[in-house]
Amino acid sequence: MSKNIVIVGYGPAAAQTAQTLASSLPSGYRIVAISSGPGYWPIAALRGAVVPGWEDKPIASTDNAFPKGGQHVLIEPATVVELRRNSIVLDEAAAGFDAEIPFEYCVLATGSAYPYPCRPRRSTFADAVADLRQTQQEVAAAKSILVIGGGPVGVEVAGEVAEYYNGKDGRAKKEITIVHSHDRFLHESGWKDKFNSTLKQQLEAYGINVILGQKVVDGPAESGKVEGGSRAFHLDNGQSVTADYVFVAHGNAPNTGLVRDFDASALDEKKRVRVRPSLQLEKYDNIFAVGDITNVKEEKTFYASKGHAPVAAANILSLINASKPAKAVKPTGQMLVVTVGSKGGAAQLPFGFVMGSWFTSFAKGKSLFIADFKKLYNAPA
């Protein structure tokens, strides 16, 4: 009987870990990956919610996660409802499996929660594509758009709307307002003033109204068109902003409820999983965590998570071979690339170097790494 390596979640960090492991596992071991739905690419989802023709680009089927007829298995759609010391429990039994699936090793890759469109609302490929297409139509019909939250997601979605609806080719400009509760977009220590000011200047050059240091006190919980048409949304300084469509761009939180219910002490004060440099949980040698949920000191980006997969895979293989895990994660630190449409944006690189539109467009804005994403899921580009 095969010994299971269970991977909980099948986002980009999980897919990379699975692929790295799959090519090196000895006979007698198999990967059992659990996915709640198709692959989703938040990096391109914001453009997919605005620009026609992009709606299928942030979504990839998991059908080709592993070669057909091989020992590795992906169960989808399925939800893990409980983590145990040596097993996980599904919401219901899957084909060929009981609801409880034992494991020798487990990789937790449950990612983070974020309002749509940065995370999907639908659990099938077709429904997720249709959802983005519907959002495109609602944005097209809107005259005034409010973006609540001015972190990277808020900046990027405002840039996508402003670039596409630029007053050309019959696409009338939208009245766009960003409201951010801090006095800078990236307000944590270490982010350069030039990084923030470059983004602000580019947004304002599009005619976007940027309001910093204020909160929307009566905003919706989810992105969408305003029911009943345009209405005023109130700020905590007594002012108001009128809009008929709202993008909610705040509320990012790690999906660590499984770990909390298993062992609350395994989480830090930010509800992230405490991991060793080997990416093993501090008190559990056979349980690993990768991606957004870890407390590795770095920005929670796809670029950062790329460094987790080879570490977790190598250390699981070491344990299988009765060796001590020796590979350690190397935090990427404070580095971020924020686009303003396909041609604009800014980036802060290691050692505090700030780059502008040309670099950002070349590195990220034009492609949004779609080819890398589709390749990760063995999906057609």
Image (cartoon, grey):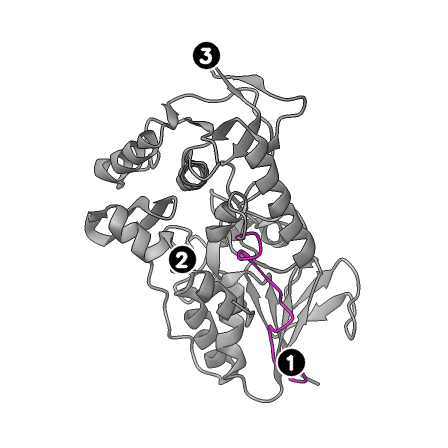
Q: Which residues are magenta?
A: 54-72
Element class at badge 3: loop
Label 2, on which residue? 367
Please indicate, yes or no, whether residue 342 appears anywhere in the rendered image: yes
- Nearer to us in this view, 174 or 29: 174
Q: Marks 2/1: CA distance? A: 40 Å
Tell me which amino acid carries mark 3: Gln
Q: Marks 2/3: CA distance? A: 38 Å
Label 3, on which residue? 239
| Magenta-span inclusion, residue 207 | no
Select label 2 or label 1 by which is in front: 2
Q: What is the x, y in percent for residue 308? A: 42, 65
- Nearer to us in this view, 28 or 179: 179
Q: Earlier in the sequence, mark 2 or mark 3?
A: 3
Select label 2 or label 3 by which is in front: 2
| Magenta-span inclusion, residue 71 | yes
Please indicate, yes or no, whether residue 288 appears anywhere in the rendered image: no
Q: Is residue 244 above or below residue 271?
A: above
Tell me which amino acid carries mark 1: Lys
Could you tell me if the residues under marks 1 and 3 are in contact, i.e. CB atoms within 8 Å?
no
Q: Quadrant of residue 31?
A: bottom right
Rate crowding at label 3 as few (under 14), some (14 to 19) or many (20 or more) other CA atoms within 10 Å. Answer: few
Q: Quadrant of residue 95?
A: bottom right
Q: Residue furthest front?
A: 169
Classified by dominant secondary structure, the portion drawn in magenta counts as loop
Image quadrant in which the N terminus is located = bottom right
